[in-house]
Image (cartoon, rainbow, N blue to C red):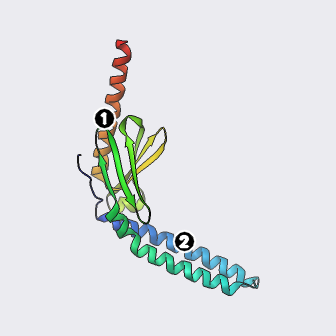
Amino acid sequence: MTEYKMLNHKSIYSMYIGYIISFIFLIIVFYVIYYLMNTHNYEYLEYVKYSMGILIIISLIYIIIAPHIYYHHYRYLVTNEKIDIKRGIIILRRILVPVERIHQVEITKGPINNIFGLADIEITTAGGKVRLEFLDSQDAEQIAELLNEFVRSMIANRGSSIEQQ
């Protein structure tokens, strides 16, 4: 791969479903808090109710806008030297991972991504973990195999250079 790739368009639907599930959980938590405060005659109940309403509106706006922005900002590049990921919604990040620092490559398919034929690749390095998200499952398998091949060849090269010394 020599040019930046975009996410599969199905990733937007996966993001929407994930955000909607989180939103439903948020509504349930807010309802429980409101119910408990209401039964105990909490004196600032009106302020809590308005604050929760504002948070729900902000969350809805975020849920509607965020997947499209993330989709359009997300780019990745995998070469035999590095992994380069550009992503973000409000704060744009660029993550560079030298291939020689890779310790482990893991493919993850959650239930939502699995429905859409998507997968994530989690790359473990000495400095932490990096994630390539919402990739087509076949692309994820190919990238993981490519990265594992790079790592195997580096280990083989190190082993042969140590034996020569």
Residue 109: percent from left, percent from top:
39, 54
Count neighbours of disc 2 (C-alpha within 10 A) and say few if under 14, some if 14 to 19, many if 20 or more. Answer: few
- Which residue sits at x=34%, y=30%? 152
Furthest toward the left, the residue is 2
Residue 152 against residue 41 in the figure, above or below: above
**Image point (51%, 74%), residue name:** 24
Percent position of residue 96, x then y? 38, 46
Q: Residue at x 37, y 14 (%)?
A: 163
Amino acid type for the residue under numbered disc 2: Phe
Disc 2 target residue? 25
22, 100: nearer the viewer:
100
Spatial distance from mark 1 to mark 2, Cα to Cα?
41 Å
Report x, y in % for residue 27: 56, 77
- Tell me: 37 left or right of 79: right
Residue 25 seen by the camera:
yes
Q: Is residue 13 above or below residue 34?
A: above
Check disc 1 and report the residue beneath it: 149
Crowding at mark 1 (Cα within 10 Å: few <14, some 14-19, many 20+):
few
Under circle 2, the secondary element is helix
Q: Is residue 108 visible?
A: no
**Disc on res. 125:** none
Q: Nearer the viewer, residue 14 or 49?
A: 49
Residue kind at label 1, given as amino acid type: Glu
Please tell me in which quadrant of the rendered image residue 54 appears. bottom right
Whether 11 is drawn above or below 37: the answer is above
Q: Which of the two discs, 1 and 2, labels the residue nearer the N terminus?
A: 2
